[in-house]
Image (cartoon, rainbow, N blue to C red):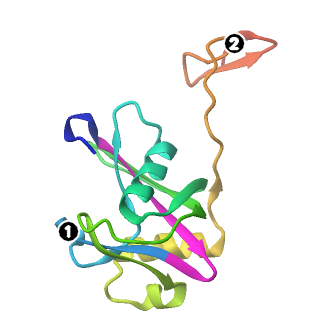
Amino acid sequence: MSEENTDWGKSVAGVVLRDGKVLLARHTYGAGKGRLIIPGGYMQNGESPEGALQREFLEETGVEVRAVGLLGVRFNMHDWYVVFLAEYVGGEARSDHDENSEVVWLDIEKALADADVPDLSKKLIKAAASGTSMPFTEFVHSEKYAPTSLYCTEFDGERSAK
């Protein structure tokens, strides 16, 4: 990813469960260095959150995913972080040998007990395993009907403020 195209205020991550296992990556830098975390990263300018999720997973883990639910959102005064429940689509888990040193499918119960897995990742894995995600609905932009405000809705093709 080119740094000049990175939106440092927006980041995404995902929890992917498959056959009783969760996909985790051993981070190589920052606060997560040496720890097994859920994969994710910063968005690129103009990129959708679900597009960033797909790109980050493919780049960092070799695994293709699709967002299917929303597990959590964290905000502060400078940025936001969205975590999706993601569905495995394909690919073989592998390290990118840059941002992570290994990518593993770890048994969910082992991940929840492992000291190398940070608390935030554990909370999100628990939420995913318990089925408590909010269903994800992809935004579809339409020039004709796209509202200009979060408070607009469409009725018979006419805009109406609520």
Q: State the residue at coordinates (61%, 83%).
A: 20
Q: Quadrant of the C terminus?
A: top right
* Up/down of 72 relative to 50, above or below: below
Q: Quadrant of residue 45?
A: top left
Residue designated by label 1 = 31
Task: Determine whether, in the image, residue 91 is placed left or right of residue 97.
Answer: right
* Up/down of 87 relative to 107, above or below: above
Inspect the image, locate mark 1, and give the three-letter code of the amino acid beneath it: Ala
Q: State the residue at coordinates (49%, 43%).
A: 51
Residue designated by label 2 = 160
Distance, label 2 to label 1, CA atoms, is 47 Å
Closer to the camera in the image, 6 or 58: 58
Sequence-earlier tag: 2 or 1: 1
Q: Quadrant of residue 126?
A: bottom right
Q: Secondary structure at mark 2?
A: strand
Q: Nearer the viewer, mark 2 or mark 1?
A: 1
Q: Quadrant of residue 88?
A: bottom right
Task: Determine whether, in the image, residue 8 is placed left or right of residue 139.
Answer: left
* Up/down of 44 relative to 126, above or below: above
Image coords of residue 70 (percent x, y): 57, 55
Q: State the residue at coordinates (29%, 41%).
A: 9
Region of the chain picked out in magenta, as a range: 9-22
